[in-house]
Image (spheres, rainbow, N blue to C red):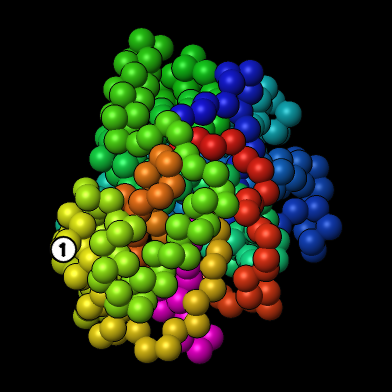
Amino acid sequence: MAAIPDDGPAAGGTGPVRDAPRGPGTGNRRDGPAQDATRLFVDHRELLFSVVYNMLGSVADTEDVLQETWLSWSGRNRRAQAAEIGNPRAYLVRIAVNHALARRTAIASRRETYVGPWLPEPLVADAATGLAPDTADHAVRTDSLSMAMLVVLETLTPLERAVFVLHEVFGYPHTEIAGMLDRSHASVRQLAHRARAHVHARRPRYRAHPRVRREATERFVAAALGGDIHALMEILAPDVTVWIDGGGARQAAGLRPVHGREKAARMLAGYATRRIEDPDIRYRRVNGDDAAVLFTGDSPYAVMVMDLTPDGDRVSGVYVVTNPAKLTHVRPDDGRNPPGRDTAPGRPDAR
């Protein structure tokens, strides 16, 4: 797993803050400290979204946390000028991270009544640009972890996940994270060590070439949607696991993950032939990985993300999101499947 060096945090993806000003020149006529606070928040909004999304795996919860962050930030700047804050970037990240940690309690409560496996909300890239659209309908840069990595991060404690995301993905040094989380340096180092060991034990360090991944993805989708059990048995790894997140809204979604090649092949073939009639398949990048997005008409039906073995010749994990509530940001676009797009715009491979 490649970490960004500790010479400074990297900016990441973005998302909408529904009630916060979009930035200077967007109708905001306030002057002085309030305008400075707005500009600073908008300048760092991409980073804040990416940090919080990678901590929570939910766009809706991330938007709510950014709204809370904006309210805390603007309230702070009503009492004192932004210039009095020595490092606004670090201050904003600290606010966002602590709001995200508080949000984890509500998320954990919802998970107790969630029907079937829970998967992160997918960030689906636009076919033409390779960038993820936000709800303001314009393309923005993303820096999200892969679906498989986000699933692994769900097994960490909230503090372990926060430390892992801040250090391994965004390159914050342990000393700075300690200040954000109000923990000792030694405590943060211990959290980082446990989280890194846990993640590395479950995720390969090497990944196949993008072209190989794309070809394997297309082979899998053709076999799965064609109900071809023989072809599925050839491409699925022996220890493959399949997650289908329907949230109780899709009757065909399994209530628990399916493990093992034979069970997975039978389940996938049956699921496709029973429930999906003549889908419109569009290949996209989802959280940085090759994936298939299935539409019925103009409505998204499912997002299918495949996790491949390090050499790229077998599928080791299948993540299918069919819960309509998690597909509200997914939309068709003009470009179907542009040829020759083997990679998305560059970002460090922190998977």
**Relative side of 152 to 143, left or right:** left
Q: Secondary structure at mark 1?
A: helix
Which residue corresponds to the image point at 33% horizontal and 32% vertical from the top-left? 199
Viewer-side residue, 200 vs 118: 200
Which residue corresponds to the image point at 61% horizontal and 28% vertical from the top-left? 9
Secondary structure mostly seen in magenta is strand
Find disc 1 in the rendering and name its residue.
263
Residue at the far top: name it: 186
Residue 70, image x, y percentages: 57, 48
Write down the quadrant of residue 153 in the picture. top left
Magenta stretch contains residue 102: no
Which residue corresponds to the image point at 40% horizontal and 12% vertical from the top-left? 185
Which residue corresponds to the image point at 63% horizontal and 32% vertical from the top-left? 10
Magenta stretch contains residue 297: yes
Q: Label 1 sits on what residue type? A: Lys
* Classed neighbour count for the residue bearing mark 1: other residues with Cα under 10 Å, few (<14), some (14–19), many (≥20): some
Residue 278 visible to the viewer = yes
Q: Which residues make up the magenta segment?
A: 289-302
Residue 177, image x, y percentages: 47, 22
**Relative side of 349 to 54, left or right:** right
Write down the quadrant of residue 225 in the picture. bottom left
**In this rendering, is residue 85 above or below 313?**
above
Residue 29, image x, y percentages: 81, 57
The number of numbered discs placed on residues in the rendered structure image is 1
